[in-house]
Image (spheres, helix red, strand yellow):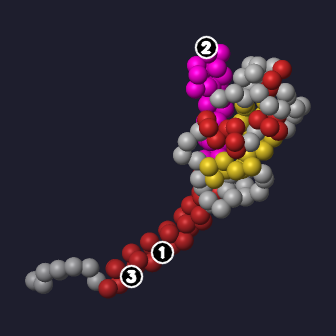
């Protein structure tokens, strides 16, 4: 009796063909995930910015010295100079348009009626955050007043 020691060449080729077919059908499902991931990251940064302004408002209300004053108009509040102080690990830029990488986000005044934060502490305004994959999300910014 002859003892079999391994796979034949035909068996190996059949397995490779089956793996190729599986890879060809599954690959298109994973190609578009980078856009979804970029959009989810932008949405997460918008949420983090909203949370940061809420915490900042609470700190300003209780008189904490390190709180950032958000008291300009809507367009003045939604700027890099004001909001970059509230977040770390990312870079905010003023203006619209896609940016070069996943750590840089454009911030502009959001939609809706303009709010003058100096006259209305505690009022929420909107800022639009755009990520490198092009998706835009609204971040709610809470005014601290003077």
- Dot 3: few (<14), some (14–19), or many (≥20) neighbours within 10 Å? few
* Outermost residue to the left: 1
Which stretch is magenta? 40-67
Answer with left or right where residue 1 lies relative to residue 59: left
Q: Which residue is mark 1?
A: 20
- Label 2, label 1: how far apart the Cα atoms are: 63 Å
Answer with left or right where residue 70 lies relative to residue 14: right
Residue for point 78% across, 51% down: 95
Q: Which residue is mark 3?
A: 13
Q: Quadrant of the N terminus?
A: bottom left
- Dot 2: few (<14), some (14–19), or many (≥20) neighbours within 10 Å? few
* Outermost residue to the right: 113
Q: Which residue is mark 2?
A: 62
Cβ atoms at labels 2 and 1 below 8 Å apart: no
- Residue 82 in percent (x, y) is at 70, 37
Using the image, determine if residue 123 lies above or below residue 34: above
- Residue 114 in percent (x, y) is at 88, 32
Q: Main secondary structure of the magenta part?
A: helix
* Outermost residue to the top: 62
Residue for point 48% across, 74% down: 20
Pointer 2 or 1: first along the chain: 1
- Label 2, label 3: how far apart the Cα atoms are: 72 Å
Residue for point 21% across, 79% down: 6
- Residue 8's disc number: none
Q: Picture quarter containing residue 129? A: top right
Q: Picture quarter containing residue 68? A: top right
Camera-near label (2 vs 1) is: 2
Element marked by disc 2: loop
Using the image, determine if residue 119 lies above or below residue 139: above
């Amino acid at each position: 009796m002859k003892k079999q020691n391994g796979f034949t060449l035909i068996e190996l080729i059949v397995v490779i063909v089956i793996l190729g077919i599986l890879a060809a059908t599954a690959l298109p499902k994973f190609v578009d995930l980078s856009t979804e991931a970029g959009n989810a990251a932008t949405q997460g940064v918008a949420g983090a910015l909203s949370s940061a302004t809420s915490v900042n408002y609470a700190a300003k209300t209780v008189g904490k010295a390190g709180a950032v004053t958000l008291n300009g108009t809507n367009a003045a509040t939604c700027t890099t100079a004001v909001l970059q102080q509230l977040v770390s690990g990312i870079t905010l830029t003023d203006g619209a348009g896609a940016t070069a990488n996943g750590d840089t986000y454009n911030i502009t005044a959001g939609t809706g009626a303009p709010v003058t934060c100096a006259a209305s502490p505690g009022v929420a305004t909107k800022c639009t955050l755009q990520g490198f994959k092009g998706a835009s999300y609204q971040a709610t910014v809470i005014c601290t007043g003077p």
